Image (spheres, helix red, strand yellow):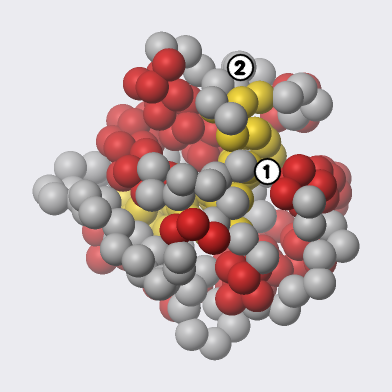
Amino acid sequence: MAFVGVKCENFPCDDVASRSYLVPGKHVDPLSVRAVMVSEASPPDVKDYYYADGDPLFQRTTVQAFRDAGVDASSIGELLEKGFYFTTAVKCGKTGYGVKTGTIKECSLLLERELDAFPNLKVLLLMGDVAIKALNYISKRKTGRNVVPPGSTYKIRGSKYFLGDVRVFPSYLQAGPSFFIEQSKRRMIAEDIREAMRILGA
């Protein structure tokens, strides 16, 4: 599928590297996508991205997160077949530890167009603070309010949030090496994926 209009024209952000700019180019049927997992930013090395050949880092940790939740899968391709789609809130790789607010807001315009391509979307899994902030920018433009309230993720994740008819899960980052370090967050990620699967009837 082609994401019409999902393209950064002038790369205005100074805290990310345009050389690692990525918008997913996998050919999927937009009607088949029922859940989208949004992580933080593209990896500095594009070989680590979800859809890269071989066994990229983002695939390795994400597939493990789904296995933790009891989902039988061994690749991103298999998860695509189950109706999941994977992208990042920021389309370029970070050059430092964090991402500036202005960068998240700018890139949320691209994420919004990307999400609009999926008419059967039922679930949004927001993996980390950057993804949560990006969706709040989208929600503010669409509805005039934030969909996810402020606060620590562990405090707010127990409530139900919706953007229209889409269930929104504020969760923790699953893409990258830190996934294997913080076991409590890994446990909560698995809980969120399990609930998402229940909603999808999978």
Badge 1: how crowded within 10 Å, few (<14), some, or many (20+)? many
Q: Position of residue 42 (x, y in %)?
A: 43, 59
Q: Residue furthest top?
A: 144
In what quadrant of the picture does the N terminus appear? Answer: bottom left
Viewer-proximal residue, 126 or 174? 126
Answer with mark 2 or mark 1, whichever residue precedes in sequence.
2
- Where does label 1 land, which residue? 172
| Residue 135, x across and y down, in percent | 48, 32
Q: Position of residue 138 (x, y in %)?
A: 40, 29
Q: Is residue 125 above or below residue 166?
A: below
Pointers 2 and 1 in contact (C-beta within 8 Å): no
Residue positioned 66% across, 19% down in the render: 151
Q: Is residue 22 visible?
A: no
Quadrant of the snapshot with the C terminus? bottom right
Q: Residue drawn 46% across and 45% down? A: 119
| Left or right, 127 with reference to 158 | left
At x 81% / y 65%, what residue is drawn? 71
Task: Kindly indicate the quadrant of the structure image that contains residue 25.
Answer: bottom left
Q: Nearer the viewer, residue 178 or 36?
A: 36
Side of 152 where 145 appears, left or right:
left
Q: Quadrant of residue 108?
A: top left
Please tell me which residue lies in front, 1 or 190: 1
| Res 79 quadrant in image | bottom right
Q: Is residue 155 above or below residue 26?
A: above
* Left or right: 15 as drawn, with respect to 185: left
Which residue occupies 75% across, 29% down? 157
Count the numbered circles shown.
2
Residue 69 x/y as whole percent: 84, 57
User: In this figure, which residue is indicated by the disc labeled 2?
Assistant: 149
- Single out the residue that lies furthest toward the bottom: 54
